[in-house]
Image (tube, coloured by chain):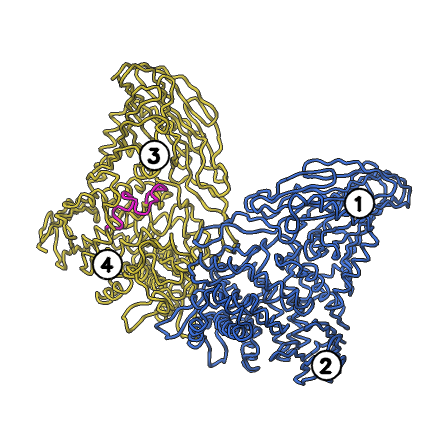
Chain colours: A blue, B yellow
């Protein structure tokens, strides 16, 4: 893997830059230049008409449609619906005509093209110089952002400058609510119109009944706008005349409001008010607000790398996308695999959130934001209990869905939906991770314990007592390595199951002791009999079967893993990679090749439970068998390689995630960016190269730089402080902007007041 | 299970009789009264208009449509199309109006109703007395058959008698080619019109390009027909007047011809000629032909049971349906799970054909017919090699499809398509079964060996050498018990794999020795290196891993089977059965419960390889764990129970298949009858109660009557002779209508000239 394989985008520390117009890359760029403010977002579609291949996408977080499931063969327990992220109204529209000719980059000659996202402030700028069919040359500049300070406001400035002759320019700013999802199982349209007014449109989603309204307010010096609104389409129109070199700039302020936050009948008024307030504030003032809001964000979480400009851009892009996707202001929202950059993987929440994203938000956005992610699952606990009941589990056992928006399961492949149950463990692990990092044990009493008990109950019913082995076994599961389905005794699943039961018991004891009232309430509400249930859990934990190969000193991924032909990834024909594009599913399943960290995921999550030699042996066995065909895989291996001091390996693995989308390794970024795996890249840097871990309640750093990096500097929010860790060859410096705190650097405990420096 | 649970149909030895009109049972009766002549068939829809719930179905064997696959989630290797049985033109139509009012049993009052299939001659008769809304009472009699003597001819006589007043009766015999499948993945219409003429319509299937034409010739005394043909619809119309008690009878002769047997441009003329010849022969003469043709059929295969009228009707119905479905006149045809009784399971050929149906046709229709079934697979060998190549197998290895019409795989559930590979073994087994029963070893040289070698090659690549076990293992398979998916070392699959390799080697030696020219041709054509390849097969056979539980003395269905909770079917809550309707797929997969014979299927196929005690132990272990939720399961257990002398068990199991459809145990006969499992019922009677087996090349009988049966008499065609076996308590009598033959009765070898009688 070579990070220069696809040098289309310019390397820049703070910007994503495209310097030419390539229609074949349009969809990819639409993903890469996507904008979001945590509650809404959209792809970098052009404002003006574009008739080339494009994937239109504007999304409002939390507004979804339950699309009827499509299956090959129905199995009992499958969900009937797949809740999908909705493509919502195209609010950015500004159609342009020059002397009667429509501006459409697919139809005219593009002479110059420049597009950038300024990640420092989340502003998309596009400049184009085109020659119209009439021969007229025109310059265009479009600047767009989604306000982080005003979450329902989108802003566009659109300038046109005739270059070689005077021209009549017609601006038609518009909102088009007649939109569809590219991915609809039965080609349905998901939205229906409620009302269209002069400057606003209001629509409702079928079945789910969400409503939203979009309003626009526009200004253009010296122009009179005429309304040309038609059902589902708001459109204003104004013509201006400009001489050569004279610029005409339209400002468009769009209010985008949904019934998540407003009464349906107030929506139009609310959207109109947002747009009008935006217009009153004016473009420049809004831009300043945006810069300030984003500067505050970056202050808490920036990462600086000296000596590797591509890596610098890569990690900033990851952080930027994560910040654009989720800001923790609403417990109904979560982090979809594609964020606001595409429709794919329709549902929103996967175990990615708990396993990969939580640590990022915890360390960069603070406790309150991270807590929202836990509350999201807490609010869906009863649905998870229903979900488990549908599969035959009883007594308040919960199985969280593989994919969900509203708590209901959306996925329907039996080997995933019913069997990839380790996700339940990741949700328990996230609670521990949160409590450990933030110190907020009180959350156990507020929501955590209920979730933990329900998850432990699930595991206690999901295991089987094997008479033959005189051990508990875990039959019929799919581990994180989805290249094995329906296996017995997947080590990772069994381990996280036992751990979940132990931690649930521990949490119960803590709540009983420290929050007796909450304890009593929870016992009553959940019919929780601590003594009896924890005794069962302890018995299972004590007598659980775990596969090992003693000779090799490794844990066995699952029963029978060593019966497979022991191929190594490096011996594969490069022309056959990725194997998921070249091998039949049958061949993949029967091979020993591993899609993503599985045993090693367990050694990552539960590193404290195992000694370094155990990690070493398992890493040396499983890493060469791992093909990393999930974007979530290399980051975990990178952290482990760094823990083992194998920095060359760590760096090699890091490179596989760092610029995955920017360099479009998998030729699929057109569908959207791999947003959740970007959190993995952050983990690789902060936990891998920064060596950050919480051990025994204390934050520890054990930095190790990859070769060639002159320095690495990252910031984390830790219990209300912003710590900056700066690593250079031979030394590490930690500064603290908050109250003094105990930390460990390279196994040395220190009390950090404002700054320490330690030689490596 | 009680065979009187659903006594809707009248018990009669030769007829299926329905004595009242019940719209709720319309679809079930349409299945049960379906007609077929081996090359075409159809459901027992009413000839006249019927606006109640109905499933229209008229099918032409071998005419199919490749419907685009529908999947939940695509996997590499899935087929793109699912070849579907096509609902073809509704040729039986005779619309009736009485004094201007349409006769429609859903709209008028049905006073009396009688419907029968006379199985002796395959004639469907329906009599109805109705009161029209006008108050007029009318009697109707419709008689219909598909000629066995003239395979492209369908005949209807339709009589109307005004009962209480004179009436004008309008007869509109018609053919409607504007039809659709109920089951179409994307709601497509599969047929398109080529031409419609006065008396005939010609259509073409989209994509697959089959053509068919339907023509009608009609007579009605004293009537003048007027043509009212419109695109895709042929219609004639005549009005007659009849006084009370005066009958008017329309005779309709339909020619149904397809491009399987005619050049497309000749189709209309051909269909017209069939219809005209039918009219020239006349209804009564055609009916006599039908009776004679069917009498000849029954002569070779009837089964008589005295002392159990329901069983008598049940087994005759099974034989009748099998005879209607397949007659071996065309190697492009095969036996679909629903025959000509419904569209479900769209494709036609499953391993049912080889495992269940072949023995029936071999023993009742003779060697030539049975051979056609083998040739069907031989003709599809190259497609099976392509199918295997698609999954990554090389060098002429063949994997026959799970479901097919034209040799291409149609099924797309990975756990079935890629893993239920034991089907390949059943195809090899059928060749052995055929050679053993018919003595026609020459077939090995003509086609058998090529198929066997290709199958053996598949197995030799599908196994894996396990370093850990120092044995060959068979990873990632689904056995006949589809309630376990993706298991390792399914005993049945591994056994049939090794057996296939042994038999391929044996067949190769036979052909080399006895048909050297054919041997040379095959070696060249298939690049077959006997010495090298059979050495590999022998090595695999010698070192293959087979799971056993030595303590219990049983073969293990698969790795880890004994880790499961050992539930017994009898301990299940009856309200939760069948479990496939009440349990989640997850729960089913994790349970030890067995859908259909799996280890026991192997002990049935390869009975000679195991001693009685081994069979006993395995039967006693697996039978109680088997829920028999496939219609193909109880028959195999019934045969084994009978072999073990457990007649009560054998009879109990036999009852679960014998009247499955007639009594609609599973409340699903509306979709069609379980035609292939009817062959299993025949096996239960002939191989179970009749104890018929071929051992060391000799036909053996070891009859054992179930309690209460006064006698059982069955006929089998054995190497050109018709043998009649009559079993009574204490004695068995075998008569022979052909040349003398050596047989074994109850372990005694006898030379059967014309008749022997032996005490039991």
Q: What is the spatial separation of the Cα atoms under label 2 and label 1, in whole angstroms?
A: 60 Å
Q: Which mark is residue B23?
A: 3
Subunit bearing disc 2: A
Asked if residue B671 lies in the magenta stretch, the reply is: yes
Secondary structure under badge 2? strand
Q: What is the spatial separation of the Cα atoms under label 1 and label 4, in whole angstroms?
A: 80 Å
Which residue is at the front of the view, A47 or A297? A297
Label 1: how many Cα within 10 Å (few below 14, some 14–19, many 20+): some
| In the image: residue B233, left or right of residue A727 | left
Q: Which mark is residue A752?
A: 2
Q: What is the spatial separation of the Cα atoms under label 3 and label 2, in whole angstroms?
A: 84 Å
Q: Magenta residues, as a range?
A: B655-673
Q: Dots 1 and 3: beta carbons under 8 Å?
A: no
The answer to whether residue B602 is seen in the rendering is no
Q: Which mark is residue B640?
A: 4
Q: Same chain, marks 3 and 4?
A: yes
Label 2: how many Cα within 10 Å (few below 14, some 14–19, many 20+): some
């Amino acid at each position: 893997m070579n990070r220069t394989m696809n040098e289309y985008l310019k390397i820049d520390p703070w910007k994503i830059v495209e310097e030419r117009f390539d229609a074949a890359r349009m969809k990819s760029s639409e993903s890469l230049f996507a904008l979001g403010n945590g509650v809404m977002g959209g792809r970098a579609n052009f404002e003006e008409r574009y008739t080339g291949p494009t994937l239109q996408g504007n999304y409002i977080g939390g507004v979804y449609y339950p699309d009827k499931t499509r299956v090959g063969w129905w199995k009992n327990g499958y969900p009937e619906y797949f809740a999908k992220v909705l493509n919502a109204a195209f609010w950015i529209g500004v159609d342009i005509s020059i002397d009667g000719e429509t501006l459409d980059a697919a139809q005219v000659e593009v002479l110059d093209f420049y597009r950038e996202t300024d990640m420092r402030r989340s502003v998309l700028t596009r400049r184009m110089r085109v020659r119209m069919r009439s021969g007229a040359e025109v310059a265009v500049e479009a600047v767009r952002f989604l306000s982080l300070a005003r979450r329902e406001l989108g802003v566009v400035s659109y300038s046109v400058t005739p270059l070689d002759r005077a021209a009549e320019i017609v601006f038609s700013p518009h909102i088009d609510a007649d939109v569809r999802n590219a991915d609809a199982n039965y080609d349905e349209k998901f939205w229906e119109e409620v009302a269209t007014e002069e400057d606003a449109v209001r629509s409702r989603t079928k079945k789910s009944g969400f409503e939203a309204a979009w309003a626009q307010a526009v200004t253009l010096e010296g122009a009179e706008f005429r309304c040309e609104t038609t059902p589902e389409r708001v459109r204003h129109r104004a013509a201006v005349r400009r001489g050569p070199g004279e610029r005409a700039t339209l400002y468009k302020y769009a209010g985008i409001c949904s019934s998540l936050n407003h009464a349906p009948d107030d929506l139009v008024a609310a959207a109109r008010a947002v747009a009008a307030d935006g217009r009153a504030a004016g473009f420049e003032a809004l831009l300043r607000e945006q810069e300030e809001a984003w500067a505050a964000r970056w202050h808490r979480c920036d990462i600086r790398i000296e000596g590797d400009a591509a890596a610098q851009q890569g990690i900033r892009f990851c952080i930027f996308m994560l910040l654009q996707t989720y800001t923790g202001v609403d417990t109904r929202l979560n982090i979809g695999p594609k964020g606001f950059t595409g429709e794919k993987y329709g549902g929103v929440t996967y175990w990615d959130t708990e396993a990969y994203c939580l640590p990022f938000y915890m360390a960069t956005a603070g406790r309150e934001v991270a807590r929202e992610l836990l509350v999201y699952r807490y609010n869906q606990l009863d649905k998870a209990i229903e979900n488990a009941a549908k599969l035959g589990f009883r007594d308040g056992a919960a199985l969280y869905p593989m994919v969900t928006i509203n708590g209901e399961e959306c996925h329907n492949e039996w080997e995933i939906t019913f069997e990839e149950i380790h996700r339940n463990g990741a949700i328990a692990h996230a609670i521990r991770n949160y409590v450990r990092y933030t110190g907020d044990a009180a959350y156990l009493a507020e929501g955590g314990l209920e979730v933990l008990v329900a998850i432990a109950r699930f595991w206690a019913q999901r295991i089987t007592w094997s008479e033959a082995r005189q051990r508990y076994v875990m039959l019929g599961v799919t581990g994180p390595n989805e290249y094995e389905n329906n296996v017995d005794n997947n080590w990772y699943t069994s381990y996280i199951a036992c751990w979940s039961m132990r931690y649930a018991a521990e949490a119960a004891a803590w709540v009983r002791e420290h929050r007796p009232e909450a304890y009593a309430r929870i016992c009553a509400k959940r019919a929780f009999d601590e003594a009896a249930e924890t005794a069962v859990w302890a018995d299972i934990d004590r007598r659980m079967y775990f596969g090992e190969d003693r000779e090799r000193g490794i844990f066995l991924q699952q029963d029978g893993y060593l019966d497979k032909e022991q191929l190594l990834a490096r011996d594969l024909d490069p022309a056959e990679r990725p194997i998921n594009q070249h091998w039949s599913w049958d061949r993949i399943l029967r091979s020993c090749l591993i899609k993503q960290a599985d045993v090693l995921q367990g050694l990552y999550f539960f590193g404290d439970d195992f000694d370094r030699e155990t990690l070493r042996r398992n890493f040396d066995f499983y890493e060469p068998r791992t093909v990393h065909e999930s974007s979530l895989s290399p980051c975990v291996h990178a952290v482990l390689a760094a823990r083992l001091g194998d920095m060359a390996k760590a760096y090699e693995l890091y490179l596989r995630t760092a610029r995955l989308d920017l360099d479009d390794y998998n030729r699929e970024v057109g569908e959207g960016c791999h947003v959740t795996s970007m959190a993995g890249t952050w983990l690789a840097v902060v936990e891998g190269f920064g060596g950050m871990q919480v051990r025994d309640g204390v934050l520890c750093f054990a930095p190790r730089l990859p070769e060639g990096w002159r320095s690495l500097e990252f910031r984390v929010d830790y219990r209300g402080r912003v710590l900056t860790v700066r690593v250079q060859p031979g030394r590490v410096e930690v500064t603290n902007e908050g109250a003094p705190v105990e930390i460990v650097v390279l196994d040395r405990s220190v009390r950090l007041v404002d700054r320490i420096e330690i030689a490596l």
